Image (spheres, helix red, strand yellow):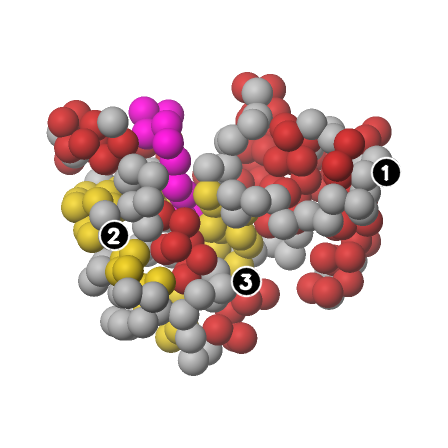
Amino acid sequence: MTRRYGERTVLRDVSVSLPAGSTLLVLGRNGAGKSTLLRILATLLRPHGGEVRVLGEPLPKRAFAIRGMLGLLAHEPLLYADLTGRENLLYQARLRGVEEPRVNELLTAVQMTARADEPIRLLSRGMVQRLAICRAVLQRPQLLLLDEPHANLDPAAAELVEPLIGRASGCTRVITSHDPPAALDEADLVLGLDAGRTAVVAPPDRLASAELEGLYA
């Protein structure tokens, strides 16, 4: 796939295939194109070239067919700052046809029930991240697109969200990370981007340390 912003090409002929139920780890320095790749897969951006298929459907032609099967955790939490956590999730639940008990289940899972009725703007960044994760998995997606999923989470909070976004979720996952040593254990396949181009595509156990360090050092 290829994507441009004006005259600047952000992704150039990136190619990768991921089997269902697997995890792809996307590595690269800032500006390598990681977030742009996630936004294309999430149907938020159109590719300018190449063939893109997500859950078997061609994009952008069939984007409408898969949006309900995607869960996106973006760099920004995608939550309304003046609404409470519960109000944010209930609003999204109504939009997606999700029953209210699912909201309560998720708030309990991430231990946010006691703070769920406070405005987002009054919560810590770690609490907001937990709520953003709840938003991403609200409709039990088949594909999770996770941009730095453990950002702002302490070890205890990271353990809380593991059943929702980790291997235990059973989802196909595409993850970006600035902490490759920790993220590699989660990956079945690594895609390394360098200035928008594919630098490497390989299982993690076939990557040399020097190759990995070149993608984030």
Residue to which mark 3 is pinned? 69
Question: What range is drawn magenta here?
Answer: 173-182
Residue drawn at x 74%, y 30% as measured from the top left:
123
Residue to which mark 1 is pinned? 117
Q: Earlier in the sequence, mark 3 or mark 2?
A: 3
The answer to whether 201 is drawn above or below residue 204 in the figure is below
Residue 196 shows which numbered tag? 2
Q: Position of residue 7 (x, y in %)?
A: 28, 65
Kind of residue indicated by mark 1: Asp
Q: CA distance from mark 1 to mark 2?
A: 41 Å
Q: Is residue 174 left or right of residue 108?
A: left
The answer to whether 64 is drawn above or below residue 166 in the figure is below
- Tell me the quarter of the image containing the C terminus: top left
Residue drawn at x 17%, y 45% as measured from the top left:
200
Crowding at dot 2, Cα within 10 Å, few <14 / some 14-19 / many 20+, comes out as: many
Q: Looking at the image, is mark 3 or mark 2 nearer the viewer? A: 2
Crowding at dot 1, Cα within 10 Å, few <14 / some 14-19 / many 20+, comes out as: few
Hey, which quadrant is residue 56 in on the image?
Answer: bottom left
Q: Secondary structure at mark 3?
A: helix
Q: Position of residue 193 (x, y in %)?
A: 24, 46
Res. 134 visible in picture: yes
Kind of residue indicated by mark 3: Met
Q: Nearer the viewer, residue 69 or 124?
A: 124
Instruction: Indicate yes or no whether the magenta region holds residue 156.
Output: no
Q: Is residue 20 left or right of residue 117?
A: left
